[in-house]
Image (cartoon, rainbow, N blue to C red):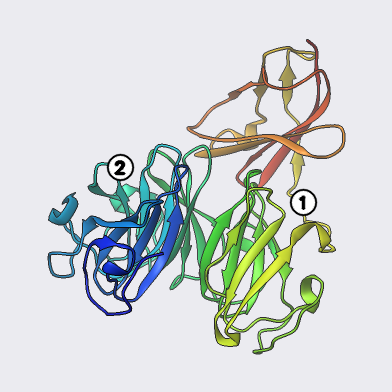
Amino acid sequence: MAGSGTNSLVDGTGTGSSFSFPKGITVDGLGNVYIGDFSNNAIRKITPLGVVTTLAGGVLLPGSINGTGSGASFNGPTGLAVDSLGNVYVADYFNHKIRKITSSGVVTTFAGSGAQGYLNGIGTAADFNYPTGVAVDDSGNVFVADYGNDVIRKISPTGIVTTLAGSNTQGSANGTGIATSFNKPYGITIDQLGNVYVGEQGNRLIRKITYSGVVTTLAGGTSSPIYKDGNGTSAGFDFPAGIAIDSSGDEMYVPDVANSLIRKIKITNIITVTEPALPTTKGNLYPNPSKDEVYIQLPEEMRNQLVYYSIIYDASGRPVYNYSYEGISEVVKLNIAGLGKGLYQVYIISGNYNMSEKLIVEK
């Protein structure tokens, strides 16, 4: 599609262009491909016709200057993700930052102080440690594989950085939220239901994180280097890196680096284990039955949380609605106008508790 095979920075068409150790890649809704050109410290754009341009960076020395186009600088751009508005998010590896580039090439720092560390906070008050992968959901939440901290971070659309999963200690423990552990999470992707998938190099596993932060092992069963096809944890990998999922949400592709293979995982064929549950508490959902919107009065133990997650399942157990929102609140409002008539189960997750209520939707 593009590149001459020579390590340099040259814009052009097809093989008339050049890159230097390209690492990250993502595609927008129009078919434009974006590349994290690692050694050129640039973000490149390739149109469907193969025309290569430099969207941002690439001229200045390695740095972390915000600006427009070539007036901005990066230091080891790695993972990329693009949202529905055409904004590109970059894991700026050596800068320990997450950068944001608008479709017109304006670069800002979305999160990260630039200090190598582990600290949650808002925007540039947070710290990262060699972030490698990024993914963005339909609500504008950005998920980060924080490679050096062995955790998965979540950045809200307003820049609030929290830890979705991982304890900042190397391990392979499944469970919920910060009670889990990872070892060098590298690639990250997200499906249409809000499940996050992680290619974990140190443990040689593919992990799954639900919208509420429940972590399980999807595939791979040993931290020893191995090549083995099989179902779920009977399969073996050796340094899985980037990870991608198709539009159906059922087929996943994994570059198995040390095995020099591209592996395919059919998710519905994998036998899953029961996910651990958070302690359940009681609240009040009203009006019930309802048509277009419903209110949930949170129990006292859930009210003083910064971030809330809501998930609604239909009668077959399929998640049909999920949303996250911020701010300390006693009452949460859900817009259910898009749900059909029927019986649903509503979950609200906040902190270490979840609330579960049945909901009848009438039309």
Q: Nearer the viewer, residue 39 or 277?
A: 39
> Callout 2 environment at 10 Å: few (<14), some (14 to 19), or many (20+)?
few
Q: CA distance from mark 2 to mark 1?
A: 41 Å
Across and down, in percent, residue 226 comes to: 68, 88
Side (left or right) of 267 relative to 1: right
Side (left or right) of 346 relative to 68: right
Please give the residue where the numbered disc 2 appears in the rendered image: 103
The residue positioned farthest toward the bottom in the image shown: 225
Q: Which residue shows up at 40% across the image and 50% down it?
A: 32
Q: Which residue shows up at 76% across the image and 41% down it?
A: 280
On the question of residue 194 being in view, the answer is yes
Across and down, in percent, residue 93 comes to: 34, 68
Please name the amino acid that badge 1 sits on. Answer: Ala
Please give the residue where the numbered disc 1 appears in the rendered image: 277
Side (left or right) of 272 relative to 213: right
Q: Nearer the viewer, residue 86 or 214?
A: 86
State whether residue 62 is above or below residue 316.
below
Say which quarter of the image contains residue 363: top right
| Marker count (numbered) | 2
